Image (cartoon, grey):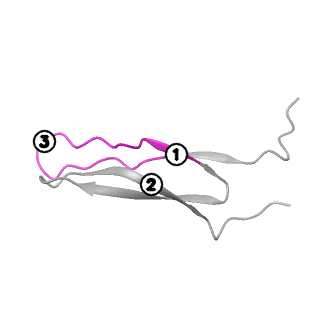
Amino acid sequence: MLNTDSAPTRRVVNAPPATARTSTAPARNLVLSVVLEADEDVEWIWTATADGAEYVSGYNIVKNEHAVRQP
């Protein structure tokens, strides 16, 4: 039996959708989602194309200063 009391809490965060500024189809994100620990957040890195579309091209995982620590 798995003891869930001491297991770290992980969560999946999906990348925001890519955008298009023209009538063309939006660019596709290079990153779809990331798995984070309870005390982590993600900063998305955006790239803009020549026609004004924007897509997620990377990410940084940062410690969440507001995370509640469980004993």
Q: Give the image location of residue 30, x and y in percent.
A: 35, 42
Q: Is residue 57 left or right of residue 51?
A: right
How many badges with numbers are in the image? 3
Indicate which label's residue lies in the foreground, 3 or 2. Answer: 2
Q: Is residue 67 above or below residue 19?
A: below
**Distance CA(mark 1)–CA(mark 2):** 9 Å
Residue sitting nearer the eye, 17 or 60: 60
Tell me which secondary structure the magenta stretch mostly adopts.
loop
User: Which residue is tagged 3?
Assistant: 24
Q: Along the line of sight, which residue is nearer the eye, 34 or 68?
A: 34
Quadrant, the N terminus: top right
Residue 59: image x %, image y %?
A: 44, 54
Amino acid found under the numbered disc labelled 3: Thr
29 up-or-down from 47: above or below: above
Left/right placement of residue 2 relative to residue 18 reads right
Per the rendered image, the range of residues in magenta is: 13-35
Q: Give yes or no for contact between labels 1 and 2 (Cβ–Cβ under 8 Å).
A: yes
| Callout 1 touching callout 3 (CB < 8 Å) | no
Q: The C terminus appears in which quarter of the rendering?
A: bottom right
As drawn, the label of residue 59 is 2
Of the residues under marks 3 and 2, which one precedes in the sequence? Answer: 3
Marks 3 and 2 sit apart, C-alpha to C-alpha, by 25 Å
Secondary structure state at the residue bearing disc 1: strand
Work out whether mark 1 precedes mark 3 in sequence or the reverse, and give the earlier one.
Answer: 3
What x and y, as percent, mark residue 41?
56, 59
